[in-house]
Structures are given as C-alpha cells and as structure tokens.
Image (spheres, grey):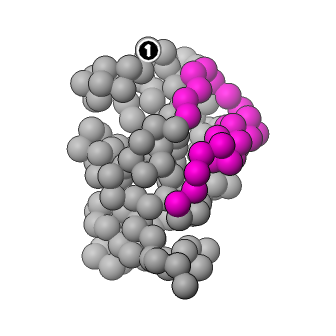
C-alpha cells in the first residue's frame, strides 16, 4: 500500500492526506469540506504559492502572468482547459507577477506567460510563451515523464 498523498486545499489551504487510489473519487477537504479538485486553476499569492509547493505531494504547474499581458489573457482559457484534464494528478495554479514581484524575481521569471512545473517543491521544467491547451497538456506530460516520480 502506498503512503497517502498530501493535497493542499485550493480554498482554505489546509493540508489533507488522501490515498493515491482515492484521488479520482473527488475527495473533499477535511477542514472546509469543499472539493480538493475543482478543474480550475488556483490563484495564488506568494504565501499560498509557497504553501502549495512545499506541502503538496502532487506536481504543481504554475502559470506566471500579468494583467497587462495580451498573450497571458489569450492563454488563460487554454490553461483552464488543461486544469480539467490534468487534475487530480497535477495542481494548476496562476501567480500574478504584478501581485508577487519578489517571487517572480526570486524565480527569475523573465518573460510572461511562463509555465513552470514543480515537483516536491523544486522546479523541474519551464516553458515561456503562450500555448494552446493541447500543447500545455503534451508539454506537462512529457516533463513529468522526464522527472522522477515519487508519488504519482
């Protein structure tokens, strides 16, 4: 039997332990009782970003974006579509570089939109530029195959 996965609630940020075999059963948060997976990207500020990265057993795919960025807005629906296809194996999140400039600087985000895939709290892949949903899915799945999987 595998160890339970730690899943951070997208609503209240509580850390939940969920057996990997039960991810597809639409688990709910033990604290706020809302769904742990919504099929939508989670908007994160710097504090929440760090919580999701450091406490989550599943990979986290982050779209770094800004409100003034046309390509970011153009890619937003594709990223939302990818969330529906990749959850619950991957948590998709959005971080505004305008609202978290120190984080963007620390991670050396130099262009937007930029997708970054994190596993076990570490960045394992990065891709700059807007992409359609099919390419986001292909890129994410390929990047996950290239990195050692601890839990998924």
Task: Verify whether residue 109 appears in magenta.
Answer: no
* Residue 107: percent from left, percent from top: 36, 26
Q: Can residue 91 be seen?
A: yes
Work out whether 18 lies above or below 48. below
Query: Residue at the spot x=24%, y=24% of the render?
Result: 102
144 within the magenta span: yes
Q: What quarter of the picture does the N terminus occupy?
A: bottom right
Residue drawn 45% across and 30% down?
A: 64
The residue under the point 58% across, 63% down is: 152
Taking the image as shown, residue 80 lies to the left or right of residue 12, namely right
Viewer can see residue 38: no
Q: Which residues are magenta?
A: 125-150
| Residue that protrudes farthest toward the front in the picture | 148
Residue drawn at x 53%, y 64% is 151
Where in the figure is residue 113, as x and y percent of width and height? 52, 23
Q: Position of residue 2 (x, y in %)?
A: 52, 79
The front one of 140 and 12 is 140
Say which element carries label 1. loop
State the image coordinates of residue 11 (x, y, percent, origin top left): 34, 61
Instruction: Give the residue number, with chain letter if any, for mark 1.
Output: 110
Label 1 crowd bin: few (<14), some (14–19), many (20+), radius 10 Å: few
Q: Is residue 142 left or right of residue 22?
A: right
In the depicted structure, whether residue 151 falls above or below residue 114: below
């Amino acid at each position: 039997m595998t160890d339970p996965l730690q899943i951070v609630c997208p609503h209240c940020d509580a850390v939940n332990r969920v057996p990997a075999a039960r991810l597809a059963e639409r688990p709910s948060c033990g604290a706020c009782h809302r769904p742990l997976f919504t099929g939508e990207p989670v908007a994160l500020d710097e504090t929440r970003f760090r919580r999701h990265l450091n406490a989550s057993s599943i990979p986290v795919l982050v779209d770094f974006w800004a409100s003034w960025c046309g390509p970011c807005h153009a890619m937003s629906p594709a990223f939302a579509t990818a969330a529906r296809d990749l959850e619950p194996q991957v948590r998709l999140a959005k971080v505004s570089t305008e609202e978290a400039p120190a984080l963007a600087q620390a991670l050396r985000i130099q262009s937007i939109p930029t997708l970054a895939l994190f596993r076990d709290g570490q960045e394992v892949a990065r891709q700059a530029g807007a992409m359609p949903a099919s390419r986001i899915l292909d890129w994410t799945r390929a990047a996950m195959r290239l990195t050692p999987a601890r839990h998924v």
